[in-house]
Image (cartoon, grey):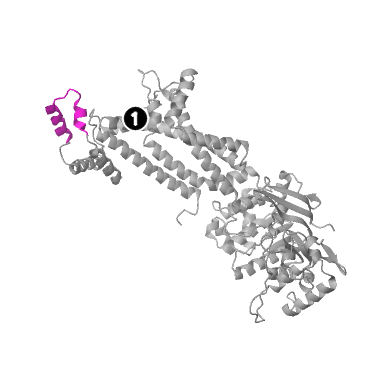
Amino acid sequence: MAPLLDVRDLKTHFHTDDGIVHAVDGVTFSVEQGKTLGIVGESGSGKSVTCLTIMGLNSRRTTVTSGEALWKGEDLVQMSPRRLRDIRGNEIAMIFQDPMTSLNPVHTIGRQLVEAIKLHREVSTRNARARSLELLKAVGIPRAERRVDDYPHQFSGGMRQRVMIAMALVNDPDLLIADEPTTALDVTTQAQILDLMARLQREFGSAIILITHDLGVVAEVADEVVVMYAAQIAERGPVERIFNRPHHPYTWGLLGSLPRLDADLERLVQIPGQPPSLLNPPRGCRFHPRCSYVMNVCRTENPPLEPVSDDPGHLQACHLDEATKDREAEKLLAVTMAKAD
Amino acid sequence: MIAVTMVTYVIFFMVPANPARQAAGQAATPERVAEVEERLGLNDPVYIQYARFMKTLVVDRSLGYSFVNRRPVNDEIFAAAPVTASLVFGGMFFVLLIAIPIGIISALRPRSLIDRAAMIYVLIGISLPSFWIALVLAYFIGFKLELTPLAQYCEVFSPPHASGCGGLRDWAYHMILPWLTLSIVVAGTYVRFIRAEVLETMSQDYVRTARAKGAPERVVMKDHILRNGMLPIVTMLGMDIGLLLGGAIFIEFVFALPGLGRTAIEAIGTFDLPKLQGVVIFGAFAIIVLNLIVDLFYAWIDPRIRLT
């Protein structure tokens, strides 16, 4: 079966006063129906921009996009704004990072949910309202009948994110893009929201793209993982491969920097240096200035994203030979005790 | 309000002039002047005069009588206020009519030709004095092209038959130039302000949410951007209307409109304290009322301000 969303060599460039920022530079991945794709990476690695590009939400004035994002066979990148609007909020919905600012402060949440429905369906306000209530209950808003006429500022952060999720799901989308949905929330609320999303995914059968920098979250909920570094994909594959047999030094760095409760480490392992500027990315492999395995070829040639020889579903972009990678991965896992298990 | 009346009194008595001499007329003898002084109560100390003034204001709800023509100041204010109100509310209507579309278009296409043209207009509007614009408009549109009357005011209601003008049409016809002047002068600031406000609101997260829901740009602008950007604009509008109601002096003067601004100038010229005090109090009152209205508007616009 063809994937729901098939992104091929997607590039997004922003024209700024300082020059062209290559925010997304040749990203390829796909999302299957009902599955969860996790996109991980540091801040500024292009995770969010990738998804905003898929949704067509970048400013048209300053953005140049190329490549393809096939949605059920239709290219979202080339699509007319009108057709794109039909899909947005209807077939593909999005949840944003900061629930405190993502709801319009001057309208009641009921009105905002009803608006989301009526933009795509010819229904009466009464029916739209009933549907909104149903969703608010589904996401666990207590006393939803009363709270539907409240304003966003009368809700807590976690409750607002629930409202956002309800709003994203009112039209029963096939794909839900969640851009760091739990980053702005406290830890217990984070777990609740993630559980909620997992439960709703089972109920509604939507596919999910989960953008996060929290590897723990990815290990828990994702089927596939894309690791992004400096606007490109460093490694991509099914979740258990990424966690059990990571093949990119950057992924090693990410896994190595996870805090652990069972070992008494002096301090967390960190990846040295800063993520590169996307205005002027380093030549060769973009990770080479921070990589402890750097070789001469890394400084001149950007490694292509290639499948691991005995595992075609697992792709990685690194010049190191596979024996070394397997050995290093083993070593790392011995230390971190295989997080995904 | 009390502070306003006090300040007016103090400033008035610092001016070394004799209102009685003015009131008594050119040819008055010193005895006559003294008599007038006595009658107007000008010989009493300042604080007694002030107390007397406040007493009539509070007890009789009266602003007293003009020094010069002995007419009740209340009547003068009530005659002048509608003229100024016509000018201000009509003018501000045109201001918004001009500024909202231009402001939005400039914000949507920053650095475009339209935006640059709008910004040049803003600069001109802010820089040029209102009386100059008034005179230029009167000269070209009123005098050369003879499209509008040069000056004078016509009553909307109860047309005075003697002067041969009155009714809604004549009123609007005579107000065109003053409105135009006011809107040219004031709209610049508003264009700039609305542009900045829309630009700022446009980058808010909830605007992105609205787009992500699939809302067309028109809905995004109307329900999400403008609705949120309105708050500061309403504030500014309220303050400006209040300020202008105290008398748009230059415009009223050039177009010979018998409004509050003109009344104030006359009062100053003749050292007519009660009349001047009346205009000042009315102006302060207008500002207070307008601010109250703005505050009420706030609650309607922004639920966060509502008391729970």
Residue at 60% of width from left, 59% of height from top? Answer: A99
Task: Tell me which corner region of the image, top left, top right, bottom left or bottom right, holds residue A265.
Answer: bottom right
Q: From the top left corner, tell me how far across and down residue B84 is, in percent.
A: 39, 32
Q: From the top left corner, tell me how far across and down residue B228 is, in percent.
A: 54, 48
| A136 is higher (above) or lower (below) than B247 | below
Residue A115 makes an appearance in the image:
yes
Q: Amino acid at mark 1?
A: Arg
Q: Which residue is mark 1?
A: B262
| A306 is higher (above) or lower (below) than A114 | below
**Which residue is at the far left?**
B31
Foreground pick, B293 / A202: B293
Region in magenta: B17-41
Task: Tell me which corner region of the image, top left, top right, bottom left or bottom right, holds residue B266.
Answer: top left
Residue at 70% of width from left, 56% of height from top? Answer: A278
Foreground pick, B293 / A266: A266
Q: Is residue A159 left or right of residue A309?
A: left
Q: Residues within 10 Å of mark 1 (few under 14, many from 20)?
A: many
Q: Is residue B152 left or right of residue A325?
A: left
Q: From the top left corner, tell me how far across and down residue B138 is, in percent.
A: 45, 23
Q: Which subunit holds the residue at mark 1?
A: B
Magenta segment, principal secondary structure? Answer: helix
SS at badge 1: helix
The stretch drawn in magenta includes residue A301? no
Q: From the top left corner, tell me how far across and down residue A53 is, in percent.
A: 71, 52
| A222 is higher (above) or lower (below) than B285 | below
The stretch drawn in magenta includes residue B37? yes
Residue at 70% of width from left, 58% of height from top? Answer: A46
Task: Tell me which corner region of the image, top left, top right, bottom left or bottom right, holds residue A287.
Answer: bottom right
